[in-house]
Image (cartoon, rainbow, N blue to C red):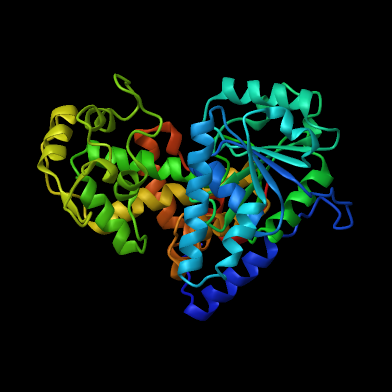
Amino acid sequence: MPAISMSPEEVSAYIAKAGRDAWIVPDVPASTPRRRIEKVGIIGAGTMGGGISMNFASAGIPVVILEQKQEALERGLAVVRANYQRSADNGRFPQEEVGERMGRLSGTLDMEAFADCDLIIEAVFEDMALKKKIFTDLDRIAKPGAILATNTSALDIDEIASVTARPQDVIGLHFFSPANVMKLLEIVRADHTADDVIMTCMDLAKTINKIATLVGVCPGFVGNRILFARQAQAQKLVAQGAMPWDVDAALNQFGFRMGPYQMSDLAGLDIGWKKGAKTANPIRDALCELDRRGQKTGAGYYDYDENRRPIPSDVTARIIADITGVAKGAAPGSDEIIATCIHPMINEGLKILEEKKAQRASDIDIVWLNGYGWPADKGGPMLYGDMVGAEAVLATMERLGAEDARFVPSNTLRRLAKDGGRFTEVQPG
């Protein structure tokens, strides 16, 4: 289908409808009974666990937080208190509410304290063996009917559920960081997740003031799976002679507040990395070995001044040249960088729909608008596909797919280019 133009009012109306539709689960009756959630357990008092617990405490729901060591528990609760205090100082709620909200939080070093919890959310780091150990313990400790949730951002929830005798009670609740601020919640339905667990979690998302989308189990679910496609192309561009700041500048021009390398420096380059590691991103590995781990160390892909202003780095440029063997040449133009990074996201969205891992095309747009800073004027990856047209996206994917089989055009993309139709109207399956 050729590109279509849309007025700002039409884009806004689309986003508003997409937001309403995301709450609807077509294959689960709205009359499905809900489970009562009166007490929540959180495993992990770190950045994610602390942020997740704030959502429930702020909504009036008591929370017990588990840590392995007393110092980690006290540190996590202190961070939560500081976050609440800062909000009160900024006038977001009365000062006395700091104490009231903290009063709903209690800490423990003993998982047995979860025995009377209605919902338990695991929020430890991404290690399958660790998560399976935790869910084995939860299966023994949690009361019948308790919902067992994992905050994993990419791991196989069916595998996690397999260690329990109650896979119907297991679900993914993928909060985005910082969890007390970000609005998106990916609710991940596993193979055996019960209907009442799904609907309870959809309702709970509203209670804690989140925007929820129901998605299926696949590597990265919807949001991160599409992000992985963009990251892979950003790395390929750098391997071909573009600089990280060239890629970021093009995506900033597109409307993202942060490009992939700016985002990496903010999050920390050492997420998922340890000293001596050899990963799929040798440039990142080399930067980390030099203790260039992002803004927190004053340098990453970029150098940073005292105001954390990013400055293109000669050190990074040399590392890239050494690793890729490609001297910096003329960077591709912004339009080519944008197509190379954005069109694979659209193609991946179509694959997600083909695999029935999203309920509708517009849910994909809601995920990216609320979890990843997609520019609102472009409506989300699927609506943007309509704006640029299937022929243009197909041309890019044929070029990228010829270099890497992961990026071959989806069957649906070929059909849209041949027969017409809109990305936003593609049905799952």
- Residue 275 in percent (x, y) is at 30, 22
**Quadrant in the picture for the C terminus:** top right
Image check: 46 left or right of 323? right
Tell which of 75 and 8 is nearer to you. Answer: 75
- Residue 110 in percent (x, y) is at 66, 28
User: Compared with residue 94, is residue 400 higher up or lower down, i.e. above or below?
Assistant: above
Q: Is residue 426 visible?
A: no
**Quadrant in which residue 142 is drawn:** top right
- The residue lying at 48 percent from left, 48 percent from top is 79
**Quadrant in which residue 307 is drawn:** bottom left
Tell which of 336 and 252 is nearer to you. Answer: 252
**Quadrant in which residue 112 is drawn:** top right
Image check: 393 left or right of 198? left
How many numbered circles does the render carry?
Answer: 0
- The residue lying at 69 percent from left, 26 percent from top is 135
User: Compared with residue 19, is residue 5 higher up or lower down, i.e. above or below?
Assistant: below
Q: Is residue 79 visible?
A: yes
- Residue 184 in percent (x, y) is at 57, 55
- Residue 170 in percent (x, y) is at 74, 35
Tell which of 224 and 54 is nearer to you. Answer: 54
